[in-house]
Image (cartoon, helix red, strand yellow):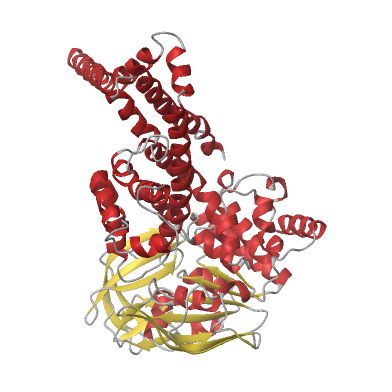
Amino acid sequence: MSIEISGVNKKFGDFVALQDVSLTIPTGQLTALLGPSGGGKSTLLRIIAGLENADSGTVTIEGVEATHLPAQKRNVGFVFQHYAAFKHMSVAKNVAFGLEIRKRPKDEVKDKVAELLELVHLSQFADRLPSQLSGGQRQRMALARALAVEPTVLLLDEPFGALDAKVRKELREWLRRLHDEVHVTTVFVTHDQEEALEVSDEIVVINNGIVEQIGSPDELYDKPANDFVMSFLGPVTSLGGSLIRPHDIDLHDSDGVLGAVPGVITRFTRVGFEVRLNIRTDFDDDVLVTLTRSHARGLEHGAKVWLVPNKGALTVPVMVPVA
Amino acid sequence: MAKARTHLEQAAGVRWSLRLLAVGYVFMLVAWPTGLIAKHTFADGFTALSAAFSDPDVTHAFKMTAIVALTAVVINTVFGVGISLLLTRYEFPGKRVLSALIDVPLSVSPIVVGLALVLVYNVQYGWFGPTLEENGIQVIFASPGMIMATVFVALPLVIREVVPVLQEIGDDMEQAARSLGANALQTFRRITLPSIKWAVVYGVVLSLARSIGEYGAVKVVSGNVAGKTQTATLVVEAKYQGFQQSTAYATSFVLAFAAVVCIVIVSILRPKEDHA
């Protein structure tokens, strides 16, 4: 097993960032640490990298006890949200940095840098300075720089967080393909559930300094351990005291189904291919239902409908009132 | 339309009068008096300059100034960069006190600095003076004291240039270097130093100008002995009082010229930073 974290605690003053966190991150996979901002996921990543020290607990990387190893001896690649490009060095020099520190022969460094720049599609920018690159290019450079030292694990801290939506989407698809090529154990932090669901093999949901659930994207989506995981992984609405996905509710125009809840459409919004309906029932003021356009035909503001969770729909009892 | 134009004309009027005021202010306070020094120096061509440089007191004073200023600048640069790193990269109790203490030399009169050093290091009753004297080290009325006084007055200059830059660049690059295997020294040499290079150069030039020009503190600790512990600024005063005005003007001119050269060199080098 690649990275073993056991009983890690971390406080910043009075703020508890991590509380008794234990988990195992498997070798060769792409694992996402997913959770809201300030939930402790970045702190955990920095503890794995040695950029932060845990107050207690241990970190083992590929069987090596690393808890007290300084960052430069852990052989991890780290990619920062804001790139952390070495501004005074060319792209090629940035990528070569780790190898030059390791005093590799010049020819070897040159070949390796060329190979990595090829991999991240930056060959023609080798002699540019980071300031002459776009955000996406800078982040690919940072990734090549981290990969150059052939790290045991690659750690990415919100790697696409500073990029605009389109580039972010391209880069995460590219990261997935890159991982399928390189197969280095990769952990990345994100607060974007779509990013985590799309890219990773395994997701660790972290909130308020504790691990809420660990599992594959499908497991998490289909069998969330609690209402937090369910509401964090996708849109939810509450119907009759349970959380349910808005697309898991069927609408009927007459009271023909057992257990159907009557309601009135209070708002009808079309967003591209889908239709979002806000419905008021006797129990819930505002139930959100999403339908495809064809299913929404004939519905309009003020119409009376009957709501039924569709077959096999996942519902989780509400423990915390959902605003 | 007419109204808009009057607004524009008014704005132009304000701009021109502000410009005139600023230029006039700097001219009256800085350019004209400094220019007069040059005028007096070259009143008889180069005779005043050559006379000054053939006076052994003056040449020795310039040598003292060079030794004291350069040593003080080296010390202030090394400690300045070190303290800047300490202030920006580490958390420790008393950090705010340290930061406040660093500004003390800006607010305390150099005369007071000189007297304070005399109190601590004088040979008769100073705290360390007698002990150092027994070991053959004389601080007061000798170059160590003069260097200490100069270091004191120029202490904040490098730090106040470097700290904002260190804060601005953040520690992301340094952490990236560490995670790539660089140790503290390699990180400093390859990452931190190139990033703060210009701030250090600026701080060094300011310190150098301040150190060359220091008068009060050095006068108190040096004893002001001609040909021994007299620096260029002290020689200016001595010559001026001793009715050797032309030598005083010539020496002053060299001091002012050195300062201007420093500033010119930096302003020539500085713009390259934008392209680098």
Q: Quadrant of residue A236?
A: bottom left
- In the displayed structure, A310 sits above or below A139; it is below
Give x and y (percent) for residue B79: 44, 56
- Residue at 42 percent across and 35 percent down: it is B227
> Residue A252 at x, y = what percent?
37, 77
Q: Is residue A35 visible?
A: yes
Q: Is residue B81 above or below residue A275?
A: above
Q: In the image as oriented, which residue stretches furthest toward the top?
A: B44
Image quarter in which the N terminus of chain A is found: bottom right
Q: Decide which of A78, B142 is in the foreground and name it.
A: B142
Q: Nearer the viewer, residue A154 or A197?
A: A154
Does the rendering let one see residue A297? Answer: no
Q: Nearer the viewer, residue A290 or B102?
A: B102
Quick one: A165 or B116, which is closer to the camera? Answer: B116
Residue B84 in which image quadrant: bottom left
Relative to residue B186, is residue A281 depicted above or below? below
| A157 relative to B107, above or below | below
- Which quarter of the rendering shows the C terminus of chain A? bottom left
